[in-house]
Image: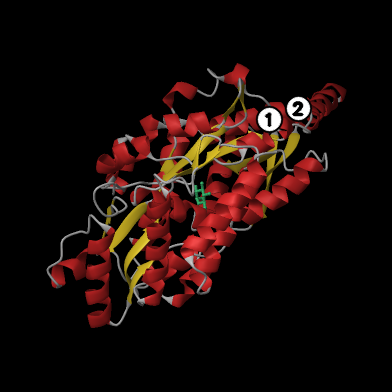
Amino acid sequence: MRKFLVVVFVCMFFVSGFSVKITMAMGTTGKVMEVLYEQLELFSKEYPNIQVEVMHLPESSTTQHDLLATYLASGNPDPVVFSIDCIWPAEFEPFLVDLSKDYEYFEFEDFFEGSSSSVKVGDKIVGVPWVIDAGMLYYRKDLLDKYGYDVPETWDELYQTAKDISSKEGIHGFVWQGARYEGLVCDVFEFVRSFGGELIDGETVVVDDPQYFNKNVAAITFMKKLIDDGISPRGVITHMEEEARRIFQNGDAVFMRNWSYAWILANDENSPVQGKIGVTTIPKGPEPDGRSSSTLGGWSLAINGNASDEQIDAAKKLIRFLTSKEQQVYKSINDGTTPARKSAYLDPRTLEAFPFFEEMYEVYLAAEPRPVSPLYTEISYEIQVAVHQVLASNKNPEVTLKELSNNLRNLMSY
Ligand code: GLC
């Protein structure tokens, strides 16, 4: 009996002695949270001594940034693990665990180049790629067929097609992300670059550079025209990804700009547009410099530098599990996000769930990053405010972009 009690006691000591609790924070969009819980259940079977508590963050990347910045700066070890947007590493680097020695452990060579370079800051690696994003155009295949239109390749074609079909069907033409937050900046870069423009080149502000200024003005003017001419609803200036998706999924828009996660949801068996939609590249702006441009987005998993050694060790195990090929396939086919791991992207199960992935592979490879800077949040804020003023009021795009150049130059000269 005594022997038995000693064994029980030793077992209890080991279970509690080695059990570690970590908090994981993540934003909520579409089905990502639901699928994370399923994955964590699988993880707990493999690692019963690691307890993961989930902290729900809001949908907006901008709000998530502000909350995490406060947590990290406070010196708190929680959350231990969190997903970071691909534009944050340069700013958050001082607060994150350097994972450069774990390159092999996380099988870094398998990630899309855009995703892995987004987490490199100098010679440090501050996160492990989890999801890659690239902007894409969703369209109603059934309605384009009904009215005899081809899939638009240019913004002008999109405008004409959306105008005609939306007036005949009594629905919106084109929905996108026009609220004043990070999503607007992603859309702005696509409009601007597809018109042949650019806002920042390396560390130089080029908004008013003679090579780009007129194209930048034309792009922002076009965004405003979409609203003024009723192609996009007035409410687009309050839309984030989910508002756009709900309208499109409900059958209330011909076109939508969004990321891949909307595909699985819009094709759900309860979706009014199930089987009626297609996905293509972002349209080109006018000749001669018009081209298609997709903004690179995505999320990586990072570890809080204030966490204890045990927590950091447990966090690495969790991150390795969640970013493994098998889990990336699972996540992707269940919540619709795109795997940052190429082998998971090209897995037959993923390609079957996303018939457009084969064609979009090049788009993911060529997706264009937003400016890389520790001041990115401030840069983004200036762009958001400037463009949103044009969209929400009658502020002149030319004057606004001149002001934006000055503000960005002041900001970046420090
Ligand atoms: C997506 C992208 C992210 C971007 C955000 C904007 O989540 O992955 O990079 O900043 O959308 O809303």
Can you see residue 275? no
Residue sitting at the far left:
148
Q: Secondary structure at mark 1?
A: helix
Can you see residue 320? yes
- Locate residue 13, reporting x and y percent: 82, 28
Total labels: the figure holds: 2
**Depicted 114 relative to depicted 107: above or below:** below
- Locate residue 93, reporting x and y percent: 68, 32
- Locate residue 218, reporting x and y percent: 37, 59
Residue at image point 29% right, 82% down: 170
| Residue that label 1 marks | 314
Residue sitting at the far right:
2
- Asked whether the residues under the numbered discs 1 and 2 touch, taking CB atoms below 8 Å apart as contact, a structural biologist would say yes
Q: Secondary structure at mark 2?
A: helix
Q: Mark 1 belongs to which amino acid?
A: Ala
Residue at image point 30% right, 47% down: 292
**Depicted 377 relative to depicted 94: above or below:** below
Q: Mark 2 belongs to which amino acid?
A: Glu
- Locate residue 313, reporting x and y percent: 69, 26
